[in-house]
Image: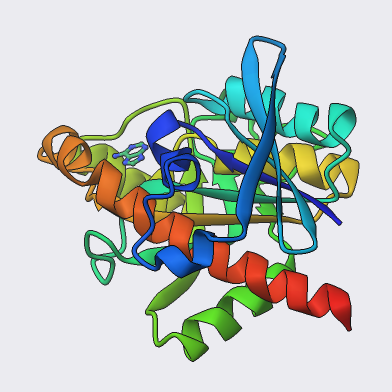
């Protein structure tokens, strides 16, 4: 099976590339064999146990994320996509370093409400896109086995770094979101349209409030590591399931 692993920023996939993972044993079998430039991005072709891996970072935002997700599917023929990265917390339960997996995602900045449509909706689309239940189930198994706290919730995506309590409260109220970031729903919409199972994991880097920019810079690296480690544990399980 060929699996696409995506982040948005290079820091989000660096733990895979530099082998900077807390549990280094996990990375022993993760091998990058080739680097390919495509559509102004770099794709790292590798393997992990019996899985073929295509790893990339899209660059920040919905447009770049859509391009990379489409490339992973159409050009590199990935059969599943797993996203790893960081997010701003909305739900006060979520603290820096905590992991959240998206049950469903929305685009908080998609707005044609002037025409009477609900926020986040355009004709022939849907407000929410749902992540793959089987991949979420695998994530829950990993969390249980490793005693890692994992929240399942709603992630709101938009082309905006939110560092403002009022904007954060609005997104919480309108979409019931637990966390926010800038790529997940874009990946979800592309995968949903192409019938490719997808999974969005985020480790909290900040609380999308007035301290967000400072916290983001401070915790980006560590939170990216936490998310990457979890993804590797999932790959191990997916690889085991493949053998059955
Ligand atoms: N990713 C991590 N923190 C974020 C924030 N505050 N806003 C948007 N995307 C983020």
**In the displayed structure image, the side of residue 186 where residue 74 appears, left or right:** right
Q: Quadrant of ligand 1?
A: top left
Where, by quadrant of the figure, is residue 241 drawn? bottom right
Q: Closer to the camera, 82 or 153?
A: 82
Name which residue lies at 86% across and 78% down: 243
Looking at the rendered image, the quarter that the C terminus falls into is bottom right
**In the displayed structure image, the side of residue 24 where residue 72 appears, left or right:** right
**In the displayed structure image, the side of residue 50 where residue 235 appears, left or right:** left
Q: Closer to the camera, 87 or 45?
A: 45
Residue 235: image location, x then y, percent: 65, 65
- The image shows residue 194, relative to residue 137, as above or below, that is above
**In the displayed structure image, the side of residue 205 where residue 15 appears, left or right:** right
Name which residue lies at 46% across and 55% down: 228
Q: Residue furthest top?
A: 40
Looking at the rendered image, the quarter that the N terminus falls into is bottom right
Q: Can residue 172 be seen in the rendering of this structure?
A: no
Name which residue lies at 29% across and 34% down: 162
- The image shows residue 240, relative to residue 31, as above or below, that is below
- The image shows residue 39, relative to residue 2, as above or below, that is above
Residue 104: image location, x then y, percent: 61, 59
Name which residue lies at 78% across and 27% down: 71
Q: Can residue 127 be seen in the rendering of this structure?
A: yes
Residue 124: image location, x then y, percent: 84, 36
Q: Closer to the camera, 35 or 78?
A: 35
């Amino acid at each position: 099976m060929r699996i696409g692993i995506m982040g948005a920023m290079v820091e989000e996939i660096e733990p895979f590339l530099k082998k900077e993972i807390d549990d280094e044993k996990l990375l022993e079998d993760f091998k990058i064999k080739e680097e390919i430039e495509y559509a102004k991005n770099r794709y790292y072709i590798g393997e992990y146990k019996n899985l073929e891996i295509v790893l990339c970072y899209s660059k920040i935002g919905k447009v770049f994320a859509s391009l990379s997700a489409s490339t992973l599917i159409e050009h590199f023929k990935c059969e599943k996509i797993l996203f790893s990265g960081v997010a701003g917390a909305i739900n006060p339960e979520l603290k820096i370093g905590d992991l959240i997996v998206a049950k469903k995602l929305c685009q908080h900045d998609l707005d044609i409400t002037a025409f009477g449509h609900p926020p986040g909706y355009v004709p022939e689309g849907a407000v929410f896109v749902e992540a793959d239940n089987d991949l979420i189930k695998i994530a829950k198994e990993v969390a249980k086995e490793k005693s890692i706290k994992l929240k399942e919730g709603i992630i709101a995506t938009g082309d905006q770094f939110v560092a403002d309590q009022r904007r954060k409260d609005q997104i919480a109220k309108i979409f019931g979101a637990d966390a926010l970031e800038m790529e997940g729903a874009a990946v979800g919409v592309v995968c949903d349209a192409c019938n490719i199972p997808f999974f969005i994991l985020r480790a909290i880097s900040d609380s999308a409030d007035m301290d967000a920019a400072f916290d983001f810079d401070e915790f980006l690296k560590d939170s990216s590591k936490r998310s990457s480690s979890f993804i590797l544990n999932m790959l191990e399980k997916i690889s085991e399931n493949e053998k059955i």
